Image (tube, grey):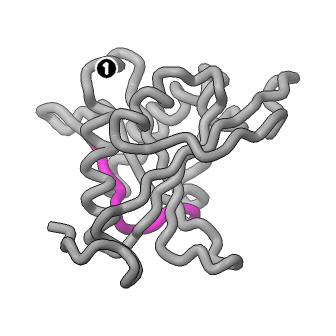
Amino acid sequence: MQRKDWKQVRAIYGEGLSTGLSAFISEAPNWSEWNAQHLKLGRLVASEKDDFILGWAALQAVPDTWGAAGVAEVSVYVMADAHREGIGLGLLRHLIEVSETEGYWTLQAQMMVENNASLAMFQKAGFRKVGFRERYGHLNGIWHDVVLCERRSQCAGGSDLPTKFCS
């Protein structure tokens, strides 16, 4: 993902937000805000010819105030017309590879419990449910529960992990 992609990326983000199932905000931020919140590595887009973007994925660092170095939060958004084509799963799998080569050993994702499609996609990519937060966020007058999922790398991270190397 490049700065030049932001207009299309933001439109896809906004489309996802309009469902009321993807985040506790109603409008996508501007480039400066988004750029400051996301890691420089692993900013991915899926595109067709002529650079028409179908989806995107990115990582946010999890604050390491509790020693959470090597942990990142995942976002994946795909335009509605391209749902169920494997684009999100492809982006997510590539993002996993990129994060592991950079030493990230845990990826996490939070989603509203009603977002069944996202939950299924993350589970196909090896994420597992590790938590549930009741009435975690409020959007458009409705409280939503959130499920927390994570994926632990088998090759990146500390010395207590298997000696297999990420490729």
Instruction: Identify residue type, mark 1.
Output: Ala
In the depicted structure, whether residue 78 falls above or below residue 37: above
Q: Position of residue 128 (x, y in %)?
A: 49, 42
Q: Is residue 110 left or right of residue 74?
A: right
Q: Main secondary structure of the magenta part?
A: loop
The residue labelled by disc 1 is 82
Range of magenta residues: 37-45
In this rendering, does residue 35 appear at all? no
Note whether 150 is above or below 132 in the view shown.
Answer: below
* Rendering coords of residue 156 (x, y %): 32, 72
**So how many labels did they put on this image?**
1
Identify the residue at image location x=37%, y=43%: 126
Left-right relation of 138 to 81? right
Residue occupying the far bottom of the picture: 159
Q: Residue at x 42, y 59 (%)?
A: 152
Residue displayed at 65% across by 31% down: 112
Residue 40 inside the magenta-drawn segment: yes
